[in-house]
Image: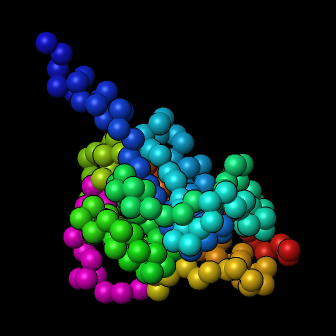
Amino acid sequence: MLPSSAVSAPQQAARPFRILVVCTGNLHRSPVAERLLRARLVSSQGGFEVHSAGTAGIAGTPMDPFAARLLVELGGDPQGAVARRLTAAHVEEADLVLGAGAEHREAAVRLCPVQALQRAFTLREFTRLMRPQDAAGVSDPAGRAALLVRGAASRRGSAGRGDDDVADPHGAPAEAARKVARRIADAVEHIASAVLGHPADRDIPLTGTSG
C-alpha cells in the first residue's frame, strides 16, 4: 500500500485553489488584480485558478486600455482579458473571493450566502486580516491559501477596520489610475507572498511615469 502522503498529493493537485476577484465593470480593478495574482502564483505549478468578474460587467467587453497598459508595466499579461458578469456559480466555485470594495464583497455574499460568508473579503481587507503564521509548517501553496482564508475569516470583526476599498478609477486622471494600480499590486504582493511562503519584499513598479 502507498503511504498516505503519496495518495494525498494527487488529490490536492486534482482540485486547484480557486480565487475570484470582483469589481463593478470587470474592466480595470478586478482584471488587474486577477492577472497580477496569476503572474505571482504561476510558480505553484497549477495549484491555482484565478478569474475575475463584475457585478455590472457586460460580457465580452475588452479590458480598459489604460488599465491594460498599467498591468503590463506591473508584470502582468492583459492578453484575452474581457469582462464577465458575476453569477452565483462563479462565487460558489471560488475558495476565495476578493472584492475591490465592500459592495463587491457583499454582492458575492448575497448571491451565495452559505459558500461566500467565510470566503469573501475585499482585497485589502484580506491583506489586513491574514497572518502568514496561520499556515506555519505547510509548504503546499494551495494548502497555505486555505489556512490563510480560514484565519482571516476568524479575525473578521475583531481586528478593527481599515481603509479597505480600492476606488474605481473609471474616468479619473491617469495618476489616480496609477495609484489604484499600485494599491492593487501592493495587496497582491502581500497575498501571493503569504501563499507561497516568501517574504513580501518585491519592489512595485510604476514609479511615476506620466500617461
Instruction: Look at 63% across and 65% down and name the residue there.
Output: 58
Q: On the rendered image, what quadrant is the N terminus found in? A: top left
Q: Residue furthest right?
A: 211
Instruction: Look at 39% across and 61% down and name the residue there.
Output: 88
Q: Is residue 208 left or right of residue 86?
A: right
Percent x, y for residue 74?
Answer: 69, 60
Q: Which picture quadrant has residue 47? A: top left
Say if 55 sits above or below 139 in the image.
below
How is the model colour-coded?
Answer: rainbow
Can residue 45 be seen here? The reply is yes
Percent x, y for residue 156?
Answer: 27, 77
Q: Along the line of sight, which residue is nearer the eye, 194 or 48?
A: 48
Say if 4 sits above or below 74 in the image.
above
Q: Is residue 144 left or right of residue 166?
A: left
The number of callouts visible is: 0
Q: Along the line of sight, which residue is nearer the eye, 123 or 141?
A: 123
Instruction: Look at 23% across and 65% down and name the residue there.
Output: 114
Q: Residue furthest left?
A: 1
What's the magenta region? Answer: 147-162
Instruction: Look at 24% across and 30% down and name the residue there.
Output: 8
Percent x, y for residue 34?
Answer: 56, 57
Q: Which picture quadrant has residue 28? A: bottom right
Say if 18 sits above or below 53 in the image.
above
Q: On the rendered image, what quadrant is the C terminus found in? A: bottom right
Q: Is residue 122 left or right of residue 51?
A: left
Q: Along the line of sight, which residue is nearer the eye, 56 or 159?
A: 56
Percent x, y for residue 116?
Answer: 31, 65
Q: Which picture quadrant has residue 25? A: bottom right
